[in-house]
Every structure is written in structure tokens, then in C-alpha cells.
Image (spheres, rainbow, N blue to C red):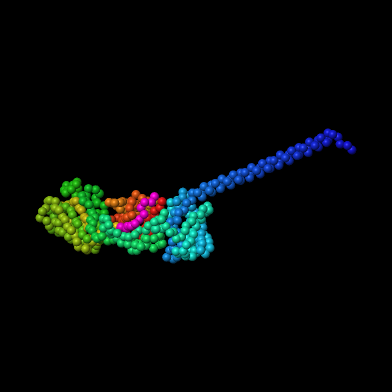
Amino acid sequence: MSISGSSKRGQGSIIGAAFILLILTTAFTFYSLHFAVTNDYIRTAQEMQQLDLKQSYEQIEFINVSFTNQEELNITVTNTGSHQTHLVWLGIFDEAANTQDYYNIDFFINPTETRPNIGNTSIPTFTGQERDIQIITELGNTFSYSYPEETVGDGGEERYDWVDETCDLYPPSAKGNHSFFSAQQGFPDSIYDNVTEGYTGTGSTNITLIDQESFEGLWPPTGWSETGRWNKESNQVYNGTYSADFDGGGSGRSGNLDTSDLDCSDADAIYVDFWYRDEGCEATEFLLQYYDGTSWDTISDLGSTASEYQWLHYQEKVTDPQYFKSDFRMRWSTIDIEGGEHAYVDFVTVTKEGSMVNYELDLEMRWTGVDYDEENEWLSIYGGTMGSEDILVDVWNSDEWILIIDDLESGWNNVNVSSYLNSNIFIIRFRGGTETSDSIKDSWEIDATFLHVWS
């Protein structure tokens, strides 16, 4: 049986179309794969660029490598980069023994932050022995340090100068004391110099408990009490518009005008001052009394005066300790005052005098032979537990004290002193934030004090 020409042509067309479709499908698959691979490459390249960029932001500077009293490694570093950095590995390399060990650490450190106590308790001590130390970050950066650092304190490119000595060269005179000054002469190791305020004597202090009460406001005044016919009136006054008044009546009336409780528990003396007026009162009818915590004591018979119908001034310094109580009070007592008789009180002032101990801090320290011509010159102080009172740091600037730290904090306190470090002598002082009426003896822990200079 023969096949016609038209059938052959139809079959060839089908084969050709299939071949073309195969070519197109293969080309599309290749294009798709190539596009995907290209995108993956671009994305990977961008991620690597971002990683490189992030890595370039990380800058860690070693400040100190030392051992604590418990022989534990204590590394202090500063983040001089612009991003938070995660420290994950600590490498210790002993070239002489041909060993290298890595220890897990986990510290985040923010920009400008100084972080002490970086280490691992399982690291064997190598005090004074040569080691290469590496800190590795989560992003893969490695920062190295050669231990021990030969340039420290020896006038090299980078130098740490610890405070040399205490002194008392400039006014005012020294106040307070150090418990262990040499503790400041090294990097932080949890051994502290306790800087403590000194006792500078006692002084008197006066506190007004009743301030020129003229009965111009509420009656009775806040905290006061009255019985009988005591009230405020304006017919007789020494000061202002009103005075406290008691009017007699019939065959006799009685009443009391009491002050509020006056806390005199810490008093050395009580000063009582008021004006009074007796109009017709007899002896024992107008009394001044004090409360001693248990009973009322008659102090003065104001009705026995011969100078009636005029304002009289009563003043007394009370030194009897039985009245130095937290509930000391005064009372004006009128007893059986008859009609036509009057008693007045005005312009009452009560002041207590006490003694107060005072503590102050003023301790100078200085460096001698310090390197003073570097580009970067910083004062660093590491504090422990701080007292409740502020502790200030001043620098001596040729002829006066200049405040450079307004309150030391726990941890690192760093301040640029390039403006003041202009000779090989450098002097600072610790000063208390409260220098008068300071009855609390404060103490502050100082772990390290040094100048960090480099170019």
C-alpha cells in the first residue's frame, strides 16, 4: 500500500512543530534556570555586601587584660564602632606550647560602652606569661591583643598612667580619707579604695516651729485647739488685724488655747516669743504652761503683772531637757476670769535650736611625669558602690578648680582632659556634693583611676 505525498507532508509538519516546541520549551527552561541562578547570585552578593558593611562597623579596642584575686581572667574592652557588637568566642593562643583554645563567651556591647569582666571561668591562669588573645564576634570579626602589653605605662604609642599619689596642695584643706589608695593604681579587679567623708565639727541650726502667728487666718490655727471662750477678735491687736482673745463673764469663765505638737526631740534649746495683754486679770487667772510629755507645767503667771492694759513682750530660752520631746506644746490658760476682764495673745514665734554634725570630702590626687602631648588624653575612673550623696571630680587648672564630672557612677567614668593636661603634673580631687549641713557620713568605692593617652 502506498502513502500519498500529502500524508507525508502532514506527518513532517507535525514532527517539525514538535521539534520547534521542544526547542522553545528547552529554551524557556534554560532561561528560567538562568534567571533563578542569577537572582540567587545577586541576592547572595547583596547579603555578602551587607555582611561586609556590618563587619566594617565593628571596632573593638582592648583596654585591659588582667587577673582577679581569684585568678580569673578579666578582660576590659571598649566598643569604638558605630553598632552594637555581639562577642561570642574568646581565643587563647600559647605560641611557646603550640596550643590554641577557644572559649564560649556571650556579651553584647553598645557603641562607646566599656565592658569589664569578659572572660571564662574555665580558662587556666597565665599571669605574666605571653599569650595572643582574640575576641571573635558573631559577624566573624576578630580583634587581637598581645599579653602582656609592653607599652602600658612605659611611654609607648599607647599609655595608661595610674594616679601616683595623694596630696593636699590647693585650698581648701583636705577632708576625708582613703582606705586603700593603691587599689586605684591598676585596672578594675574588685579591690576598692573606700573614699570616705571626714568629720568637720558641729554647728547650730535653728528651725522655726511657729512663725509669727497673728491669727489672721483660720480659727483656731491649723493644729491648734481651744476651749471656753477663746476666739480671734480685732478690738485689741499687736500685729495685723486680729489677736487671740478670751473674754471673762459673770462670776468667772475658764478656757485654754493650745498650740499644735512641736517636735523638739532633737533640740538643745527652745526659744519662745510672743506678745500678751492683761486687762483686769488677777494672779493665777492668766497662765503660760508647757507640756512635758506627761503633764502641764505652769511656767509664768501672766495675770500677776502690774502693767495692765498694754502689750507686753514675753521671751524665754528654754533649756530644761524635760521639754525636749516630740509632742512639746504650749498653752495659755485662763481660769475664772470674770465679766469685764480680758486676756490677749498675739504674734507668737517658737524656734528650736539644735546641733548638727557635718561631714565633708575634699581629697586631692596627682600624677607626675605624665605624657601630656598626645592627640587623645582621657581620664578614666572605675567606681564600685556609690554613696547616696553625689561625688564630684574637679581638675586643677593652673589657678582654680574646674568641675569635670558632676557625679561619679558605678562602672566606667570617662572624660576628655586634653584641655587640662598641659604639663607632666596633673591634679584632680574628689569632692562631696553636699558640703554644709551634711549629717550623713558617706563613702564611695573607687577601683581604678588612670590617664589613657594615645595618638
Please name whichever residue, 375 or 413, is drawn nearer the observer in this view of the structure: 375
State the image quarter where residue 447 is shown. Answer: bottom left
Please name whichever residue, 319 or 416, is drawn nearer the observer in this view of the structure: 416
> Is residue 18 placed above or below 70 in the rendered structure?
above
51 left or right of 414?
right
State the image quarter where residue 438 is shown. Answer: bottom left
60 magenta-colored: no
Find residue 31 and report its horizontal and vertical position in percent: 66, 41
Please name whichever residue, 339 or 420, is drawn nearer the observer in this view of the structure: 420
Find residue 283 and report its horizontal and vertical position in percent: 13, 58
The region drawn magenta spans 363-375
374 magenta-colored: yes
Find residue 21 and report its horizontal and vertical position in percent: 73, 39
Looking at the rendered image, the quarter that the N terminus falls into is top right
Count of marks overlaid on the render: 0
Residue 102 showing in the rendered view = yes
Residue drawn at the location 19% of the way across and 61% of the way down: 319
Residue drawn at the location 83% of the way across and 35% of the way down: 7
226 left or right of 145?
left
Residue drawn at the location 38% of the way across and 51% of the way down: 374
